[in-house]
Amino acid sequence: MSGMDITNARILVVDDNELNRDMLARRLERSGFTVDTADGGHSGLERIVSGDYQLIMLDIMMPDIDGLTVLKRTREIYSKTELPVIMATAKDEGSDIAEALSLGANDYVTKPLDFKVVRARVENVLGYAQAVAELTRTNERMNRDLEAAARVQASLLPGEPIDIKGAEFIWQYRPCDELAGDGLNVYKRDNEHVVMYVMDVSGHGVASALLSVSVTHHLSQMIRNRQSAADDESCDSNLISPASLARNLNTLFPMEAVGRHYFTFLYGVLNVKKRTFCFVSAGAPGPLVVHADGSADIHDVPAVPIGMFPDSEYEDTLIELQQGDRLYLHTDGLYEERNPGTREQFGRDRMRTELCAASTDPFVKSLDGLFQSIISWRGSDLLSDDIAVLGCAIHAANPD
């Protein structure tokens, strides 16, 4: 039915009564339709299978194959929207009408036929089918666009593994829909410094995803710019200060200019040689550090998300790390999944307990185990929020 024009629709009339069949065909043709006819169930089925019709007018009472059987076989091939069927039946055959509707008839008319009623029902059924076909095409086009956009988002995730002596990096990124507002990335700046960040744009859907992509693009330009923008502070002088970068983003992405969206943000620079992590938090959950002995610290730094207020202040925070420490940056989707029975959140305490229990496991398995616990808690692998988590393990001795 692709591209169907109601006024030029091709209709098949199936009726063993020659007078009724020809009269209905002529009336439909005068109304602008193209009409073919079949003199019984057998010939009707042959035409339905081989022809390209937009509507079938099908009599119920026929001697070779009755209309209900024809309808049933038709529905094995075509859905109600792919090929509408209007049944013709006697006024006193209510049971036939009920069965026809249950088998997939779109509508019915009763004999003797009132052509004004027939035409109104034909136009109504064809109009509905056309609307469904157009909606289907629109949805298919939107799905293709969403898939393309999702591929663009995926291309912005970390590429090849970070190769730097003394540290190992892992990450997980799980959108709850086709597109996500969460984002993460990790960059090796030199043999000593690695940049890491996670972010979470408010809301869901296309608008959030577009802002996420835009922020990712700007971050990429800022991070790869070798010129220093440091104006404090505790980070290395040849790198942009995390706090300065957050202030720049807050100026670039005010809520009023980006559809009332804001985003939480955790950005930091890992110095592998010094074993320090200098970071800024803008409304994001603080970094979680799991120590080799199985204990853990959460470094929350209260601050306003990016874009909320033009004069928001952000400060750098420095964490001293030790050999064997594991550093995790994450968005709040990691621990806010709810148990469907109790509505209780998974929570940060469970998250910390899970990661501490995995402190002696291979690093990559720590996130695999955590995600499995979250999925078990929710009772489904269909998550309610996007999740972005980025981890770093401090290994061996300091690089030379």
Image: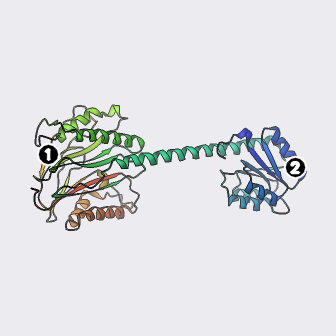
Q: Are marks 1 and 2 in contact (CB under 8 Å)?
A: no
Examine the image and state in which quarter residue 296 appears.
bottom left
What residue sits right under mark 2 in the picture? 20
Q: Is 363 drawn above or below residue 185 in the view shown?
A: below
Image location of residue 32, percent across then percent down: 78, 38
Residue that protrudes farthest toward the right in the picture:
19
Left or right position of 50 against 265: right
Which residue does the image show at 64% across and 45% down from the upper left? Answer: 2
What residue sits right under mark 1 in the picture? 317
For marks 1 and 2, the one nearer the N-term is 2
Tag 1 secondary structure: strand
Task: Report how far apart the C-alphas of labels 1 and 2 lie in the structure.
Answer: 87 Å
Which residue does the image show at 28% across and 50% down from the upper left? Answer: 331
Residue 69: numbered disc: none
Tag 2 secondary structure: helix
Image location of residue 96, percent across then percent down: 77, 59
Q: Is 380 drawn above or below residue 8 in the view shown?
A: below
Q: Does the image show residue 375?
A: yes
Q: Give the amino acid at mark 1.
A: Thr
Q: Nearer the viewer, residue 320 or 61?
A: 320
Left or right position of 176 against 167: right
Q: Give the amino acid at mark 2.
A: Asn
Examine the image and state in which quarter residue 334 appears.
bottom left
Examine the image and state in which quarter residue 351 appears.
bottom left
Which residue does the image show at 69% across and 58% down from the upper left? Answer: 75
